[in-house]
Image (cartoon, grey):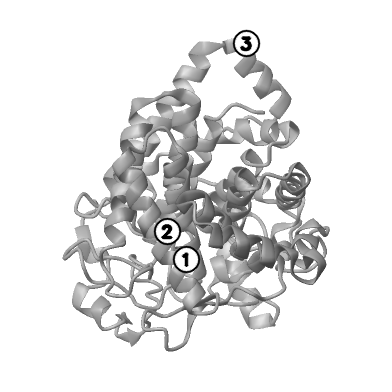
Amino acid sequence: MKPLHHPVLACLFLFAAGAFADTNLLERTKTLCRGYAEGFISPATDLAYGKRLNGPRGLAVLEKPEEVARGRVMGERRPWGYGSGIEDPAYQTGMMLFALCDAEEATGEAFFAELARRAYRGLRRMSTLSPVEGFVPRGPHPADGKSYYKDSSLDQHSLYVCGLWRYHRSRLASPKEKAAIREIVGKVIRRLEKTQWSIQVEDGSVAAHAGGSMLRWEPRTATLLLMMLAAAHDVTGDGRWKEAYDRFGGEENGRRWALLAKEIERSRDHRYTMFMNQHILRMETLRRIEPSAERKAVLRRHIEATAEDMLSAPYFRAWRSLDWLGEESWEDAAKKEVANAYLQPLGVTVASEVTVMDLWRKFDVNRLSPPALRGRRNHYEPIALATPAMVWQIALLSQKPELIAKVRPTVREMLEQVDFSKVDSGWACNYSVLAALWNAVPSP
């Protein structure tokens, strides 16, 4: 790869190139989206999946429908479906729908409108699967259109609502579609109220593996609760959700808003994951709904600070190792040896002070890792493509011109240099699509 290393020169080039450069970039974005749709979105369900569906094995890359129905993955009981390939369609499709609506609004491109309508159809279909009203499942399997995992999560539920809310707010949704969204979102929020604001498994017997109470005094759960209530009120018009929004927002002298106004943690090790974009999208959704300019500014500053820290922090200290190493930590000698063996072709170790931008510059789709991680090999997508692309998304949503200008050249590099037909990681491709779509939106 031969990346552009000077963002100022790159920006001057874009300015000098004028409309032709913009048109070229837009066409590359559409090409990326088209390839993503062909590879990862099932024509049977109109939902995005975590593994490439148009490869040599076809749908066989996914867990079998009968195993999904039993709550199993690779012979083990795993009712949350991790590793199945069908565990995150609400996450990946919901975020994509949000970004598509933003890109369509900015460009007027019919292609983005068509793909957004398709994503909406997939999310609407998802609402018909469970006998429990308001439950957002992990699935369905594209082979039978009905098998799903019953232990869902806060990310599936919240990003499902974010995507539907954004489509409802767009010029693309018909009156009939808006009515359907009001009904769907209403059912989701009523179920959460019934479970006392807790994300639970389908039958409500226990907290979800990646769910639980939304009432915890933490910035992420504060954002989650307030966003869900704000979106529910905005979509349904039901005053009870506005009353709940004001009540929870004002509880203990506005403690939730105070949590969001605090400085982010910049010193804690392993403070970030490869899935932090979900928190930022919930925060961005809340920012767009919240009428108070003061509160909007609180949310905007939090997004800005997160993007700034992510772009500059040493990756191996700031990010958890689970997302690329498959382990919670590499601190002991044996795990450190494995981690460094995996990283060796990149010319770095876990002691290297490299950032996500440095790791992006090392991405080469033709470079295959050694079989250091339990025999698994990849093209370093988790650390050199997916995570950088996720950080670019957050910078592009920050509304801070300096941050946006810093990442735009790298998004262009990605669009020009990466052969995505060789990338089988659903997360890497989905995150790249999101970055490209938000890159199509002009700076504020």
Along the polypeptide, which appears first: circle 3 or circle 1? 3
Dot 1: element: helix
Camera-side residue: 367 or 277? 277
Q: Quadrant of residue 134?
A: bottom left
Residue 227 screen position, x and y as percent: 59, 57
Look at label 2 and name its amino acid. Val
Q: Position of residue 257 (x, y in %)?
A: 76, 60
Residue found 44% across the figure and 36% down from its top: 170
Residue at the image point whose x is 73% and y is 24% from the top? 8
User: Mark number for residue 189?
Assistant: 1
Q: CA distance from mark 2 to mark 3?
A: 46 Å
| Residue 159 in the figure: left or right of residue 298 | left
The residue labelled by disc 2 is: 185
Which residue is drawn at the image coordinates 39% and 42% (left, top)? 420
Q: Which residue occupies the foreground of this view, 431 or 293?
A: 293
User: Which circle marks residue 16 in the picture?
Assistant: 3
Left or right placement of residue 239 versus residue 120 in this view: right
Discs 2/3, front: 2
Q: Nearer the viewer, residue 387 or 247?
A: 247
Could you tell me if the residues under marks 1 and 2 are in contact, i.e. CB atoms within 8 Å? yes
Where residue 92 sits, quadrant-wise, is bottom left
Left or right: residue 437 versus residue 311 is left
- For label 3, the crowd category at 10 Å Cα-Cα, with few meaning under 14, some 14 to 19 and many 20 or more, is few
Task: Please tell me which residue lies in front, 251 or 345.
Answer: 251
- Can residue 319 be seen in this snapshot? no
Establish if 23 lies above or below 110.
above
Q: Residues within 10 Å of mark 2 (few under 14, many from 20)?
A: many
